[in-house]
């Protein structure tokens, strides 16, 4: 009987062939936790009697959700993770190194064929690497830190076949928002997603990570991007689904007429063509998060803003996804372009997306954001409204002071990215 | 058998409304309880009593992996959460901290009604109307974890997973 990608990856880690619906105990290749979840994981690990990690090389702790620490309470939680690292010898990324998901990929902690768990819901991001990656809570993670194993119910798979070519100027973010709108906020709960089709074959790694990242916004356990066309800087082998694999649902979606997409408050699946929101005044614009703060995103924003000024009623904030990206953007002039246009550039990290620090909106503020969630109160104030869009939409809206189609401020023929 | 007064909410209650991200950076449970459900129902904290039951619609707990969400609800005094469906990480987190979560495809429970949950039989009874609702069966490993009071105790006892 044929297997989906998820069934194959779980089988190879369970020591036997398993299929959707079955329970399996699997060996885990690596785990990570952040300053938001790591302290709980460490506490649970200790409570389980943990004295040493199952594999110090398989564990990473990252400070990214509240960095640099805004108060002594959080600073002490950071210190707790530093002290734990000193004792256990795990990998550690301190303040300013970047967002957990970007760091796991950049530093090769997660690779194709792996099963990787993170105490963060957007761990699905590594599906871009043809790895089975899922978010879990802190105690589930602690159990892996201790035993190297977890249990799974093998998920059914939804296959999303993306046919046609994206129009010029339409990005991976527009595509994934469209898919989240179609599948729904809980449409893939407990399931794996396979993204495939000609539309994504030429996608960069960064754009593939955008697709896999927001599998979480459909409730999925994992989001696997077809590795056809994936280019990495090291040797790897692809895990492909069998031709006779069984899928719970297959959606075929023609992307050739897609417009810029936008998620209206307060649910990431409230997705519409940008037309319905055009002209909505914004007070804050945010380019950041594990979804869209990579070099290609910063390049796109710089292209929109080059030689221009952010609207006087708008605060534009930029949080690069990692120090490497920050340094690359410094070296190629992108940071200078953004700053000259009036953007405020912060250290690599992800605090504002989740309301922990940096750019908390005022009552009544409207925010256009390149992040993944627009729940009420998400950015720290329940009386603000968050719209989600691509970095191009965020930059264009920052320029005009209202939600704007990037095509109205930039000739899309000059765009090179997806 | 848990029995208590129901607090009923709707669909897609996300983890930010259960406990806003800005309050989650603490190991102090009392600080979590102080803000539980505050952007959903500011009255919840003053209404809730130990042994009450939280009842919701579809996709309860959607969003973040924060275990602080079920921890805060449990610490507020809620004994069991009943919903039409749960987001997967929240569901697993709740079991892992020893908080029973019961999925019933449909129910007619309204706020203030008395509800009884029979975890072994897998039923939810609306004591105000007498209606009985059948719960979705949970994988055995989750029942075992719940019976031990959570994953910490389960692993202390078994050393590793047994499926």
Image: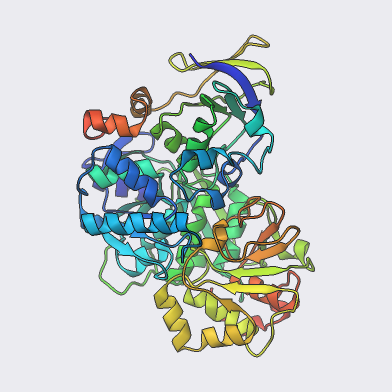
Please name the residue shown 48% across and 51% down the image.
B25
Please name the residue shown 55% across and 54% down the image.
A252
Q: Is residue A285 above or below residue B100?
A: below
Residue A91 found in image quarter:
bottom left
Count of numbered marks: 0
Which residue reaches farthest front? A72
Residue A307 found in image quarter:
bottom right
Would residue A243 be seen by someone viewing this image from the given angle? no
Judged left or right of residue A394, residue A126 is: left
Position of the N terminus of chain A, as image quadrant, is: top left
Residue A290 locus on image (x, y percent): 48, 63
Residue A373 locus on image (x, y percent): 59, 55
Q: Is residue A47 above or below residue B147?
A: below
Judged left or right of residue B129, residue A104 is: left
Residue B50 locus on image (x, y percent): 55, 23
Please name the residue shown 20% across and 45% down the image.
A51
Judged left or right of residue B84, residue A103 is: left
Which residue reaches farthest top? B130
């Amino acid at each position: 009987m044929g297997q989906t990608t998820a069934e194959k990856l779980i089988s190879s880690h369970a020591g036997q062939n398993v299929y959707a619906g079955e329970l399996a105990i699997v060996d885990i290749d690596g785990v990570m936790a952040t300053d938001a979840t790591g302290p709980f994981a460490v506490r649970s690990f200790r409570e389980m009697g943990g004295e040493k990690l199952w594999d110090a090389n398989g564990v990473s702790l990252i400070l990214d959700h509240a960095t640099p620490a805004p108060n002594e309470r959080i600073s002490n939680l950071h210190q707790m993770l530093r002290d734990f690292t000193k004792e256990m010898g795990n990998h550690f990324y301190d303040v300013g190194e970047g967002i957990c998901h970007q760091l796991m990929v950049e530093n090769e902690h997660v690779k194709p064929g792996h099963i990787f768990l993170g105490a963060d819901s957007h761990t699905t991001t590594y599906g871009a690497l043809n790895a089975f990656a899922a978010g879990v809570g802190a105690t589930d993670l602690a159990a892996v830190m201790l035993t190297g194993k977890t249990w799974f119910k093998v998920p059914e798979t939804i296959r999303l076949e993306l046919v046609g070519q994206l129009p010029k100027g339409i990005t991976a973010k527009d595509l994934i928002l469209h898919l989240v709108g179609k599948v729904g906020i809980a449409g893939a709960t407990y399931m794996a997603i396979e993204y495939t089709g000609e539309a994504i074959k030429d996608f960069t790694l960064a754009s593939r990570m955008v697709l896999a990242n927001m599998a979480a916004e459909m409730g999925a356990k994992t989001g696997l991007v077809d590795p056809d066309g994936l280019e990495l800087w090291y040797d790897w082998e692809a895990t492909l689904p069998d031709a006779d694999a069984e899928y719970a649902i297959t959606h075929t979606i023609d992307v050739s007429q897609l417009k810029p997409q936008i998620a209206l408050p307060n649910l990431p699946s409230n997705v519409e063509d940008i037309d319905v929101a055009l002209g909505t005044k914004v007070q804050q614009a945010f380019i950041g998060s594990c979804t869209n703060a990579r070099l290609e995103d910063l390049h796109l924003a710089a292209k929109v803003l080059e030689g221009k000024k952010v609207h006087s009623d708008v605060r534009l904030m930029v949080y690069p996804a990692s120090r490497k990206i920050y340094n690359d953007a410094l070296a190629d002039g992108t940071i200078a372009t953004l700053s000259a246009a009036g953007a405020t550039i912060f250290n690599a990290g992800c605090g504002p997306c989740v309301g922990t620090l940096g750019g908390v909106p005022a009552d009544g503020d409207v925010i256009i954001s390149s992040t993944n969630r627009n729940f009420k109160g998400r950015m720290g104030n329940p009386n603000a409204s968050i719209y989600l869009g691509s970095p191009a939409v965020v930059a264009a809206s920052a320029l005009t002071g209202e939600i704007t189609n990037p095509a109205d401020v930039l000739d899309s023929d000059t765009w090179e990215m997806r | 058998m848990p029995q208590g007064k129901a607090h009923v909410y709707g669909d897609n209650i996300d983890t930010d409304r259960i406990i806003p991200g800005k309050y989650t950076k603490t190991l102090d449970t009392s600080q979590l309880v102080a803000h539980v459900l505050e952007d959903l129902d500011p009255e919840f904290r003053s209404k809730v009593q130990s042994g009450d039951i939280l009842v919701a619609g579809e996709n309860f707990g959607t969003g973040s992996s924060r275990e602080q969400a079920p921890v805060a609800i449990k610490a507020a005094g809620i004994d069991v959460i009943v919903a039409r469906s749960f987001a997967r990480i929240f569901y697993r987190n709740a079991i892992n901290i020893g908080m029973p979560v019961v999925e019933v495809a449909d129910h007619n429970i309204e706020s203030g009604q008395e509800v009884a949950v029979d975890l072994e039989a897998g039923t939810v009874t609306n004591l105000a109307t007498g209606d009985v609702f059948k719960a979705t069966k949970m994988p055995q490993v989750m029942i075992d974890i719940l019976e031990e009071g959570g994953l910490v105790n389960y692993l202390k006892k078994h050393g590793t997973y047994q499926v």
